[in-house]
Amino acid sequence: MVEYVDPRTHDFLELRSNGLVNMHTGSLVAPVVDGIPRFVDPADNYAESFGYQWKKWHSIRSDVRNQGYNLQSVILERTHFSEFKLEGKTLLECGMGGGDDTEVLLRLPFYEVHSFDLSTAVERAAQYLKDPRLHISQASIYDIPYPDRSFDVVYCHRVLQHTPDPALALRNICAKVKPGGLLFAHSYKRSRRYMSEWRYKYRWLTKRLPWRAIVLYLDIAGPFLHRLNRFMYRHRLTRSIAYKFIPFYYLSRHAEGGMTAETSVLELEKQITFDALTPWHDHPMRPDEFRSIIESEGFEILYMTEHPISPMYCTAIRRDRSA
């Protein structure tokens, strides 16, 4: 098993009655609360809107609890994991949220899956995911509690843009991949078209509002905006107006989750809108920066997808063999 370390000193930890302690200093590094090691100081948790979000919409993105969502197809198409031998491999998931991707990853033949998130959404994940291969912790992507170069596969999906410094976060996850190991990384793409979306006009205000106020807005206005978007997105001119100004996500039938029941589509649109309006950080990366960081960390990019608007993602292999 890949063991936890003190993210600041890199000393190994041992479990005692009060939590995980540094084996050399004896100091408490991570109390264990409800069976989950907590490496995060609540004062440093800039992502707690996700904790609220994934507990409220606890099943909307789950393949198991929302039949027809088909997240597994999305993940396998993006990662190309089906092309690699995964038996006996260890995986680190950086930013698990409420565990929907984790649920899919556990269907693959990994030997161990280690998943962490900054938010308390890890509690929802622990509630639904019962697999002896899974190890959950609450931790920061800037202080990952594992040794460098210790995982066969590192996976980071829909996370980087929600960190204060996506470039540094990307370098941090690269550091955890073994020589010869795989990296899957994803980010929103900073493009002129994407940055014209409605979210970037309203986030300066909405991220400062109480989350319950945003939920109230979604519950009251959501059904009407859902119908309005259905009409507006039929024509090119009105589609552009809706994309730029209507503060509610439009989910086409061809998009991820678009083939679920109509009631599920509406709830999914609410969840995605909440996800767009409430996080404190939303920093899409430039494609050249994304690629340059990965390659400078010793990786060869095997697959790179750059959608015209957003997002972008890649699967890469670590080629450098230095210790």
Image (cartoon, rainbow, N blue to C red):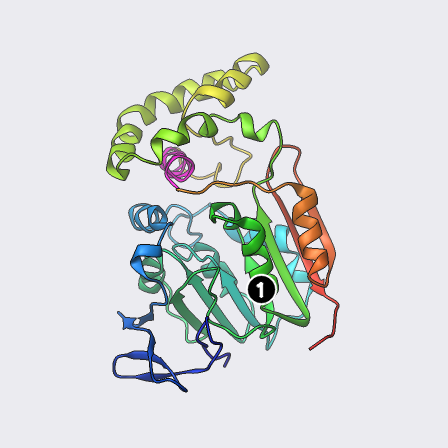
Tell me which residue sits at (55%, 69%) in the image. 91
Residue 20 picture quarter: bottom left
Q: Residue at x 47, y 25 (%)?
A: 198
Out of 271 and 275, give the one closest to the viewer.
275
According to the image, label 1 marks what residue?
A: 154
Q: Quadrant of residue 195?
A: top right
Query: Is 273 in the magenta?
Result: yes
Q: Is residue 248 magenta?
A: no
Q: Position of residue 202 (x, y in %)?
A: 40, 27
- What range of the chain is rendered magenta? 264-279
Amino acid type at mark 1: Val
Whole-percent x, y for residue 115 in the image: 45, 65
- Image height of 321 relative to 244, above or below: below
Give the total number of marks visible in the rendering: 1
Residue 268 percent coordinates (x, y)? 40, 38
Quarter of the image with the C terminus is: bottom right
Q: Could you tell whether 265 is left or right of 295 in the image?
A: left
In this rendering, is residue 180 above or below 197? below
Residue drawn at 66 percent across, 33 percent down? 308
Looking at the picture, how far across and down is residue 289, in whole percent? 67, 46
- Relative to the observer, which residue lies in front, 182 or 14? 14
For mark 1, give the secondary structure.
strand
- The residue sitting at the bottom extreme is 24
- Magenta: main secondary structure equals helix
Instruction: Name the side, left or right, on which 303 lies relative to 206.
Output: right
Nearer the observer, 248 or 281: 281
| Vertical arrangement, residue 231 with respect to residue 57, above or below | above
